[in-house]
Image (cartoon, rainbow, N blue to C red):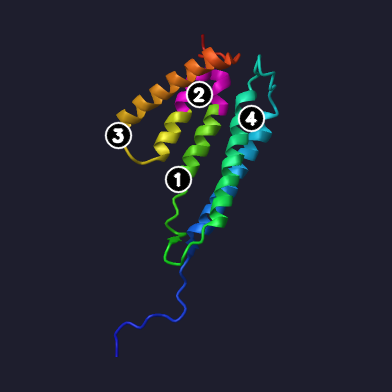
Amino acid sequence: MPLHRPREREFDMKLSSKTGDIAGGVITIGIGVFFLIYSFSYSAGELVRMGPAYFPRIIAIAVIGLGIVVIATARKSAQSDDDAVRLISLDLSSAVKLAAGLAAFAAIIEVFGFVPAVFVAALAASLARGEGSLLSKLVICAAITAAVTVLNVLVFRAPVPLIGWF
């Protein structure tokens, strides 16, 4: 007789990858809808003279589209039971860090300007991913900030102050 008898009905919280992808798509759509609705409190302007809400609306629509693609792909793929992910080990800290980065961008841009807001958002995104040293993340964030700032000034010519305290 074995010393340890397995329980007949063991409570095991499992979430298939398919269900996890669908949930991730729904969460992504929800975040996109939230920022799309929030962007309506600002003026969008026109294509030639973009307002402060023009770019966030485009990004929010793109995020909603990505969420739809994630859900559509998850529905088409057939996942086996072997490809199960434990719900308990589902890491929500990355999603929280990304959402905090977007919220920080929205809060910082009016007070401190475009450059610090982009840097903080890029830093939050890089911190959501656990790989790499802090120095490498800061260098990458600085490069992203420089590239996005050049794009904003030369291509989009958005009327957002680059640095708010000047």
When asked about the image quadrant of residue 8, the answer is: bottom left
Question: Label 2: how many residues lie within 10 Å, few (<14), some (14-19) or many (20+)?
Answer: many
- Tell me how far mark 4 sits from mark 3, CA to CA: 33 Å
Q: Evaluate if marks 4 and 3 touch, with contact meaning CB atoms under 8 Å apart.
A: no
Magenta span dominant secondary structure: helix
Please name whichever residue, 17 or 78, is drawn nearer the observer in this view of the structure. Answer: 78
- Tell me how far mark 3 sits from mark 1, CA to CA: 18 Å
Q: Amino acid at mark 1?
A: Ser
First in sequence, mark 3 or 1: give its number: 1
- Tell me how far mark 1 sits from mark 2, CA to CA: 21 Å
Under circle 4, the secondary element is helix
Residue sticking out furthest to the top: 166
Residue picked out by circle 4: 57
Residue 86 belongs to the span the image colors magenta: no
Which is closer to the viewer, label 4 or label 3?
Answer: 4
Residue picked out by circle 3: 133
Residue picked out by circle 2: 117
Can residue 146 be seen from the camera position used here?
Answer: yes
- Quadrant in which the N terminus is drawn: bottom left
Q: Amino acid at mark 2?
A: Ala
Question: Label 4: how many residues lie within 10 Å, few (<14), some (14-19) or many (20+)?
Answer: many
**Residue visible at 42% across and 56% down?**
89
- Which region of the structure is painted magenta? 106-120
